[in-house]
Image (cartoon, helix red, strand yellow):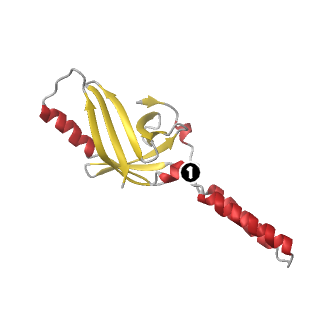
Amino acid sequence: MLSGSSHAFAEAPADRVRRWCILQIKIWMYFCQANNEKMKKLLLVAVMAIVFLGSCRSPESKLIGNWKVTDVKTDFGKTQLPPALEAHIIAEQKKISFRIINDSVMVLMLDNNTHEAKWKMDKQHNISYYFTTQPHTVNKLGKWNGNEIVSDTKIPLGKLVVTYEKK
C-alpha cells in the first residue's frame, strides 16, 4: 500500500469542458442573430471545433464501466504450495470485480459486498484508489494498458499478477 494525501484525488468533472463549450455556443448564437454570412461561417467553424474537442475523450472516461478478472498468474519462486492452496488463492482473486462510475468514483465488489472508493490515474496510467473512510491509505489497483488493467503485486509468498478486462 502506498500512503499519500487525499488531495491528489481532487474531483474534476469530465463534463466541465463540455459545459463551457455549450455556454460559449449559446453566447455566440446570441451575438450572431444578424444575417451576417461571415459570422455564420465563424459560428459553424466554432461548432465544428467544439464537436471535435468533445469527441476526444479523456483516458479516464474510457475506463467507465464494469471490470472483471480475466486472468490470474502466480509466481511463488521456490516456495512450493500445495495445489489446493494455490487454486484457492487464484479463486479468491477471481471473485473481485469493480465498476468505475465516473472520473473519480469506483465501486469494488467482493462476495456480494460493495465498497465505494475514490480513484485516479497518473500520467503513466497507474491507477490508485482509497476508501473515503481511510483517505490517507492509498492502494494500487494496477496499470491500464489501453485494454486491460494489470495488477502486479508482491505478496509474502511471491508475486501475483491479476488482469482485469472491461465487460
Which corner quadrant holds the C terminus?
Answer: bottom left
Q: Is residue 103 visible?
A: no
The mark tally for this picture is: 1
| Snapshot quadrant of residue 40 | bottom right
Looking at numbered disc 1 in the image, what kind of residue is underneath it?
Answer: Ser
Residue under the image location 28 percent in, 39 percent down? 72
Q: Nearer the viewer, residue 131 or 143?
A: 143
Q: Nearer the viewer, residue 134 or 154?
A: 154
Residue 106, above or below 162: below
**Residue 4's spot in the image, x, y percent?**
50, 31
Residue under the image location 31 percent in, 46 percent down? 69
Residue under the image location 36 percent in, 49 percent down? 165
Which corner quadrant holds the N terminus?
Answer: top left
Residue 58, above or below 19: above
**Residue 92's spot in the image, x, y percent?**
23, 41
Residue under the image location 17 percent in, 38 percent down? 87
**Residue 85's spot in the image, x, y percent?**
15, 33
Q: Secondary structure at mark 1?
A: loop
Position of 3 compared to 26: left or right?
Answer: left
**Residue 139's spot in the image, x, y percent?**
42, 35
At label 1, counting other C-alpha atoms closer than 10 Å, the crowd grade (few under 14, some 14-19, many 20 or more) is: few
Residue 53, above or below 129: below
| Snapshot quadrant of residue 91 | top left
Q: Which residue is mark 1?
A: 58
Position of 148 compared to 49: left or right?
Answer: left
Q: Is residue 111 visible?
A: yes
